[in-house]
Every structure is written in C-alpha cells, then in structure tokens.
Image: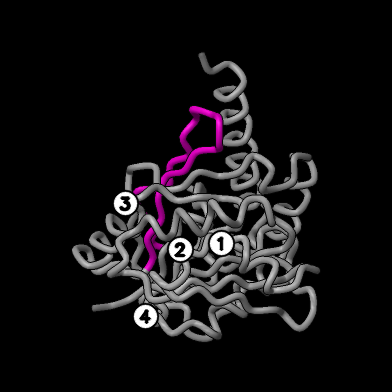
C-alpha cells in the first residue's frame, strides 16, 4: 500500500502541537507511514516530543527533527520532504488540525481519479465560513486566478514534487510551490468538497495589507503581464473581502 508522510513545520506552537498530532493519529493508521515534526524554533526537540502523550507514541512513528538554522515554514517543509520515506506527502501546520477522515477521503480520490495533487475545503476555528478549493486546476494561471488552496489540506504524490522545493518567502511560499508544481506535465489536480482541516485564526498575519503587499510582490516575481496581474490581484482582494463579510455578519 502507498503510504503517507505527514510533515508538520514547528516554530513555537508548543501549546497546540499536541492537538495537531492527535488529529493525525485519528486518521486511518494503515495510511500513515510517519509523522515528521520539523523544529524550526528555539525549543529542544525533547520538549516538543514530550508534549505528545505517552499512549500516543508508537502507534505511528513520530520524529522531531531540528533545522540547522531558522529557515521559516517553507524551509521546514523542505527538510521534512527530504527526510520523508512515504510515497505521498501531506502538510499540516502545527497550529491546525485535521478532521478524522481527511486522509482516507483524499487518498481514495487520489486513486480513483489518478490525481497527483489533492486539496480540500477548510474553516477557521470558531467560525462558520468555509473556504472551498477550486473544482479544477489545469495550469499555473488557473491556480492563481481560482485560488483557495489551504496548505494544511494538501496531499501530493512525492513523484510530482521530485526536486521542487519551497522558497524562503515569509508569505506566499506555499502558493509559489503550488505554481511550480502546476507547470509540470504530471500535475493532476482534484479536490474534496468536504471540510478536511480546521485552521487557527492566528496562523497567518492579521494585517491584511501586509498579506496583500507580499502577494503583490510574489505576482510581480512571476513576470505576468500587467492586465493579468491586475485581474489576479482583484480576485484576491474580492475573495478576502467576501470572506471577511461572511465571518463578520454570520448569524
């Protein structure tokens, strides 16, 4: 059976890592080969490992690995990719959690549709708004215009990743990674309609103007023509405003 390596980049989320690991252990254990927690912060590996209850250790191999220096979330994921032994990679941020059937429903979709990249819907903790992924993506431009891919929802065949790695960008390093994968011939996208991940509301910058400036910088680096860049930026802002309105005025 094809097995999954779960990569969790860790910085200082010591109070949350326990629930993130629990959510992986709630998955179908036949699918998970290993959990790799990449320590990109200042805590000792033993401190992080001992946050995991004793009764949970041993069901699925759990490794806590230190980066040699601070590399950011993208660099931490790169370390996990390079040390992984599974045929499929799943990403989970240390402050997010998965629903219990996340891996099983995505794995079955991967098999039934011949996909190499599977995403899913997600919610922010304590909020009712659902962020849905695109139904289809066939190119880098479609990925940029449709948007909506959450890193903690993604399942990717390792063959698709190959030597592609995350950049050191503070923001948008995940979008850049998806774009680089979408340019490959073996890129086959699928998405589950159900919510598979719960995001921490503190998981990204609360300053949306900061996020917007990073996204603009990223788009500029892709050397898009000005009209296309403007349209993608407009979609990005519109999605953000729509999400904000739904969260603010939800019953």
Q: Residue furthest front?
A: 54
Task: Identify the mark nearer the N-term, 2 or 4.
Answer: 2
Which quadrant holds the N terminus? bottom left
Image spot of residue 209 (x, y percent): 78, 40
Pick whichever of labels 3 and 2 is earlier in the sequence: 2
Label 1–label 2 contact, CB within 8 A: yes
In the picture, the disc for residue 52 is 1
Q: Earlier in the sequence, mark 4 or mark 3?
A: 4
* Rendered image: mark on residue 83: none
Query: Could you tell me if the residues under marks 3 and 2 are in contact, i.e. CB atoms within 8 Å?
Result: no
Give the residue pinned by disc 3: 101
For the residues labelled 3 and 1, the Cα–Cα distance comes to: 21 Å
Image check: 80 left or right of 187? right
| Pick the front one: 232 or 244 | 244
| Residue toward you, 117 or 204 | 204
**Element assignment for label 4:** loop
What is the CA distance from the residue labelled 1 to the residue labelled 4? 25 Å
Mark 4 and mark 3: span between their CA atoms? 19 Å
Label 4 belongs to which residue?
87
Foreground mark, 2 or 4, reads 2
Q: Closer to the N terminus: mark 3 or mark 1?
A: 1
Circle on res. 56: 2
Answer whether residue 80 is magenta in the image. Answer: no
Residue 7 coordinates in the image, percent (x, y): 53, 69
Of residues 106 and 8, the one nearer the viewer is 8
- Whether residue 67 is visible: yes
Residues shaded magenta: 117-138
């Amino acid at each position: 059976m094809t097995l999954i390596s779960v990569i969790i980049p860790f910085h200082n989320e010591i109070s949350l890592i326990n629930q993130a690991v629990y959510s992986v252990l709630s998955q179908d254990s036949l699918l998970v080969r290993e959990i790799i927690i990449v320590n990109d912060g200042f805590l000792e590996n033993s401190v992080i490992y001992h946050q995991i209850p004793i009764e949970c250790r041993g069901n699925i191999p759990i490794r806590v690995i230190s980066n040699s220096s601070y590399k950011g979330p993208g660099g931490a994921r790169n370390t996990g990719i390079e040390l992984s032994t599974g045929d499929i990679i799943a990403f989970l941020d240390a402050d997010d959690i998965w629903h219990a059937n996340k891996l099983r429903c995505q794995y079955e979709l991967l098999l039934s549709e011949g996909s190499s990249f599977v995403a899913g819907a997600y919610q922010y903790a304590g909020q009712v708004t659902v962020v849905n992924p695109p139904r289809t993506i066939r190119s880098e431009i479609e990925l940029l215009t449709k948007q909506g891919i959450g890193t903690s929802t993604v399942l990717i065949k390792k063959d698709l990743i190959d030597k592609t790695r995350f950049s050191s960008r503070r923001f948008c390093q995940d979008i850049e990674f998806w774009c680089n994968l979408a340019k490959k011939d073996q890129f086959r996208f699928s998405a589950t309609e159900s919510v598979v991940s719960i995001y921490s509301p503190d998981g990204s910058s609360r300053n949306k103007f900061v996020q917007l400036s990073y996204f603009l910088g990223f788009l500029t680096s892709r050397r898009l023509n000005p009209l296309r860049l403007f349209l993608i930026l407009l979609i990005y802002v519109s999605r953000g405003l729509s999400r904000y309105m739904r969260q603010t005025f939800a019953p």
